[in-house]
Amino acid sequence: MSAVISEHQVSKRISDPAYSKWVSKTFPALKGNIFLGSAGRGPMPITTVVAMEKLVKSWRMSITRDKTEDEITADFKKEASLLIGAQTNEVAFVPSTTFGINMFAGAVRWKKGDEIVICDVEYPANVFPWALAASLGGAKLVTVKSKDGIVDEKDIEKAITDKTRLVTLSHVQFGTGQKMQVDRVAEACEKHDAMLFLDSIQALGSMKFNVKRKNVAGMCAGGYKWMLGPVGSGILYISKDTATQMKPQCVSWTALDAEQRKEAWQKVVLGGDQSERRISLGKDISVFEAANECMVPEKGLTESVKFLRSLGLGNIEGRIHALNDHLLEQLDSKGFDVVTPRSRSRRAGITAFCGKKKFDSMDDEVQMLKELDNVKVAIRQGVFRTGVHFFNCKEDIDKAVSKLSKICQKRGLI
């Protein structure tokens, strides 16, 4: 008989009835689904949903601003900084990965001739902000080509020169699930005095990570995938040293340093000339924060991060690896071709695989997902993509692979 699972334990057994029972109570949104879709959108734990509902209810009963809002932001900064090993004045709440990347890219003081190194398999959110920044600032995009969807860090190192101002990289690639060797790229950046920026939306929440140990200048991750937060939430990290060298392209009055912010508010209350030409900004990430943040999703992400940290990111990462080891065995037994690197050091929660050929029609994708029904996987870059998280179990994987193989055999794909 399995022991009762508390919210502070992650089972080491990939098949554990008591653990699955706890999962059902903790994630009611999973009911009726074989959910392997955390790389698209993760389910929120019930504690997060309750915390958000409680906040909305409290606002419905009172319209007076109180210290609760400041406490929510302080709590978020504490949890986000603990999650990634940063200081509280280096993290900010953002509504999405795209928003955070744009904030960072727009604030770099680009010079003509600067180069931005980027890979050819990045998600659009980590492409177009840099393309815009390059076009406005006179910089140049240098593209590193992948081979069969896999990026060789040697090619990134070769692309980094003394002209390189920044390297932008997905921590885990959205299509193949390749976990990038961040240490190696960070070392190459340091040699050439270049910044490293990470799109970590497919990483945070599924593994242990410390930005300080990796020499990362900036990082952003939406909260609604592996971190199990609500849509409209995310974490932006900018190292303190990097922040002092940046010039934000959009600011709120709360981005001002303490003295000028006090003066501005005094004029709001007592009156005075607000046609100020002088701008004295703060010296940390506060210059990137909104004057009035969206408190409900911020509260939600904070609760989800607390939940993940209570379970232990090392425990979560270990269970994900064990589950994906089993998934790889099942895929091999059914004749699927695995795209994701097999070494644990080169993968995280995503596994990408295909049959005899890749999907080349949007209609085929729609039809395949319709046939899969309650088996929630995705098709990305022409192949199947699963996102296995700690709440999944062996039975989820067995049922999903069984249904996938039957459909693919029927279609002559395996």
Image: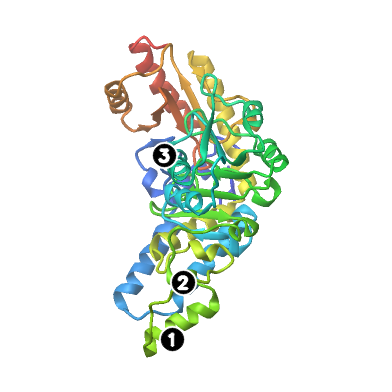
Residues at marks 3 and 2, CA–CA distance in whole angstroms: 34 Å
Q: Residue at x 47, y 63 (%)?
A: 289
Q: Position of residue 198 (x, y in %)?
A: 56, 43
Residue matched to label 2:
254
| Kind of residue sitting beneath label 3 | Gly
Residues at marks 1 and 3, CA–CA distance in whole angstroms: 46 Å
Which quadrant would the N terminus be assigned to in this image? top right
Mark number displayed over residue 40: 3
| Kind of residue sitting beneath label 1 | Gln
Q: Earlier in the sequence, mark 1 or mark 3?
A: 3
- Front of the two marks 1 and 3: 1
Residue matched to label 1:
266
Q: 246 and 372: which one is in front?
A: 246
Q: 338 and 315: which one is in front?
A: 338
Whether residue 170 is visible to the viewer of this picture, yes or no, is no
Q: 319 and 273: which one is in front?
A: 273
> Dot 1 surroundings within 10 Å: few (below 14), some, or many (20 or more)?
few
Whether residue 326 is visible to the viewer of this picture, yes or no, is yes
The reply to whether callout 3 and callout 2 are in contact (CB within 8 Å) is: no
Q: Residue at x 67, y 38 (%)?
A: 162
Task: Locate residue 61 relative to residue 172 in the image: left or right.
Answer: left
Q: Residue at x 36, y 37 (%)?
A: 33
| Kind of residue sitting beneath label 2 | Thr
Q: Earlier in the sequence, mark 3 or mark 2?
A: 3
